[in-house]
Image (spheres, rainbow, N blue to C red):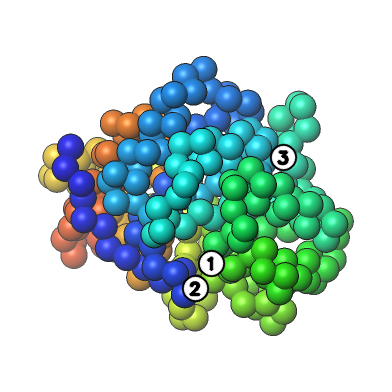
Amino acid sequence: MATTTLDSIALGDLTVSRMGFGAMRLCGPRIMGYPENRENALAVLRRALDLGITLIDTADAYGPYVNEEQIAEALYPYPKDLVIATKGGNVRPADGRWVPDGRPDHLTQACDGSLRRLKLDCIDVYQWHVPDRNVPFEESIGALKALRDAGKVRHVGLSNVSAAQLAAARAIVPIVSVQNRYNVAARDSEDVLIACERDGLAFLPYFPIDAGDLATAGGVLADIARAHRATTAQIALAWLMARSKAMLPIPGTSSIAHLEENTAAASIELSTQQFAALDAIASQSG
């Protein structure tokens, strides 16, 4: 499959492809441990770069630790234009739960661990995975600022935050991106997206092609997909990229074929009528 020409987007003072790759699905079942086919995971990462993707998104909680180790194994030494964005502040006990931990000491230790596993001296974009209701918000953000001041982190990003939390964080440390759940049928973070677009921040929608959400989108998505001889997932990604100049989708997959399909979605141009029909899905789905 030929490489799709991907537009670029600013991520702080960095420039990355406007479609990234979310590496989470390269782990084992329930995002725990290694996958059965370890070599396939490495091949998917390498193919992502072949397709022109220059942003890889991960987290220390994926595996845990496995995903960062896979990225280093597959891609180190890294190309100069590759940006790796990882996350800290979520821990995974043996039972597979996701447990927020926003204590400053933990965030510092988590960042140090990510630096070691990724074989980096400085993480391009370090994202706080999720606010911890047991730790004052400002204390956690202060730890991220300290990491940036220490040169361990080039840029700070947030994930799973409200518009109010984004504003509060920006009063303490510069923020370059927000990663919240958002797709054609799930738009609870619309106000956060608007804030990102207004202020020049990148918005990374996670679960951009969630199967359950796409099913909610119903026949409209399927009809438009048929018109373009595309998959419903491709149309959902094309809509995201047309939705806002701040949008930076990071679809994930463990399949090279699906990776190629997702990347090809960047070349799909929706008509004004098709975009409006998809835009109306959120109100229809409640």
Whether residue 2 is visible here, answered yes or no, is: yes
Q: Residues within 10 Å of mark 2 (few under 14, many from 20)?
A: some
Query: Are the residues at dot 2 and dot 1 in contact (C-beta closer than 8 Å)?
Result: yes
- Residue type indicated by callout 2: Gly
- Residue at numbered disc 3: 98
Viewer-proximal residue, 280 or 255? 255
Whether residue 286 sits left or right of residue 266 in the image: it is right
Q: How far apart are the alpha carbons under marks 3 and 1?
A: 22 Å
- Residue type indicated by callout 1: Ser
Q: Which mark is residue 177?
A: 1
Question: If the image is split into quadrants, where does the N terminus sit?
Answer: top left
Residue 256, image x, y percentages: 32, 32
Viewer-proximal residue, 231 or 5? 5
User: Residue drawn 26% across and 39% down?
Assistant: 261
Judging from the image, what secondary structure is the residue with disc 1 in?
Answer: strand
Position of residue 72 relative to residue 176, above or below, is: above
Q: Point out the tag, 3 or 1, that comes first from the N-terminus.
A: 3
Residue 166, image x, y percentages: 64, 72
- Residue type indicated by callout 3: Trp
Q: How far apart are the alpha carbons under marks 3 and 2?
A: 29 Å
Quarter assignment of residue 213: top left
Q: Which mark is residue 12?
A: 2
